């Protein structure tokens, strides 16, 4: 695949807080296209039809080719841009964040709005979690049933994701692993199975690995 890793959100999530009687609810989600981002924004709007503002930002493309934000009636530069800055500072792409505001009757001022929308997005991103999308490979390993316990134990110590396991007279395991780990993991599988594991590469893709996970 020979592509670079990129960061995105692990899942959709939200969080909320109140400042000077205004309630802010931050939402964040991974999205793959601009159309998907717009649908997500609309879904949040529909969920909070009576909110005063629905401010958002999204970044699409591994190289951040599409970047959009909107203040939705807040003073220019106080809402959408701060939301965007949170996404940019965390180096996230293929993601969308929406911060909903229910006005509480007390004006926050430009600085207060920037801080509030920044916090709303940051809370949502923290709740969603960051995943590192790395070039990865999915392999299938077929080996005798009697060897599986040993192999499974060894796999639990390695940077691999066990996707599926089927048991017959043999065990068929489907594993996802980073491209950079493929050679060493396949050599280890051969060693753990006394050379009896039959390994087949199924496909190559980007796979979400938790941010900060040790790849050694």
Image (tube, helix red, strand yellow):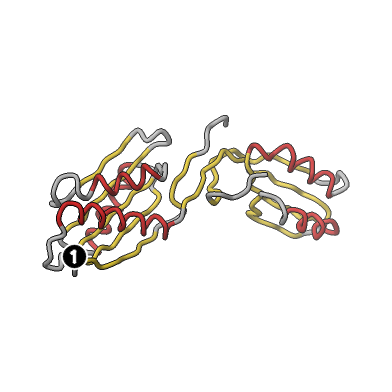
Q: Position of residue 60 (x, y in %)?
A: 36, 39
Residue pictured at 64% horizontal, 45% vertical: 215
Can you say whether 60 is above or below 169 in the image?
Answer: above
Quarter of image, res 52:
bottom left
Residue pictured at 32% horizontal, 58% vertical: 27
Q: Position of residue 12 (x, y in %)?
A: 40, 57
Q: Quadrant of the C terminus?
A: top right
Can you say whether 63 is above or below 118 in the image?
Answer: above
Horizontal side, residue 78 vs residue 7: left or right:
left
User: Badge 1 is on which residue?
Assistant: 102
Residue situated in front as seen by the camera: 182 or 126: 126
Residue situated in front as seen by the camera: 61 or 6: 6
Residue situated in front as seen by the camera: 110 or 37: 110
Residue situated in front as seen by the camera: 180 or 213: 213
Q: Position of residue 175 (x, y in %)?
A: 66, 49
Q: Quadrant of the N terminus?
A: top right
Quarter of image, res 183:
top right
Residue pictured at 39% horizontal, 36% vertical: 61
Horizontal side, residue 91 vs residue 135: left or right:
left
Outermost residue to the right: 194
Badge 1: residue crowd in 10 Å (few <14, some 14–19, many ≥20): some
Residue at disc 1, secondary structure: strand
Residue pictured at 88% horizontal, 47% vertical: 194
């Amino acid at each position: 695949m020979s592509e670079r890793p990129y960061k995105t959100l692990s899942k959709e999530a939200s969080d909320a807080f109140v400042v000077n009687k205004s309630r802010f609810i931050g939402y964040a989600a991974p999205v793959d296209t601009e159309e998907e981002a717009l649908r997500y924004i609309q879904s949040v709007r529909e969920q909070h039809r009576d909110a005063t503002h629905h401010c958002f930002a999204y970044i699409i493309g591994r190289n951040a080719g599409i970047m959009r934000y909107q203040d939705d009636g807040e003073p220019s530069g106080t809402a959408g841009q701060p939301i965007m800055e949170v996404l940019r500072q965390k180096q996230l792409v293929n993601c969308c964040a929406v911060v909903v505001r229910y006005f509480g009757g007390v004006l926050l001022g430009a600085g207060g709005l920037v801080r509030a929308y920044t916090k709303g997005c940051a809370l949502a991103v923290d709740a969603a979690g960051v995943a590192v999308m790395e070039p990865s490979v999915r392999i299938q390993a077929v080996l005798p049933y009697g060897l599986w316990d040993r192999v499974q134990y060894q796999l639990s110590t390695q940077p691999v994701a066990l996707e599926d396991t089927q048991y017959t007279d043999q065990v068929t395991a489907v594993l996802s692993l980073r491209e950079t780990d493929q050679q060493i993991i396949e050599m280890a599988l051969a060693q753990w199975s006394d050379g009896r594991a039959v390994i087949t590469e199924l496909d190559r893709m980007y796979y979400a690995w938790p941010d900060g996970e040790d790849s050694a």
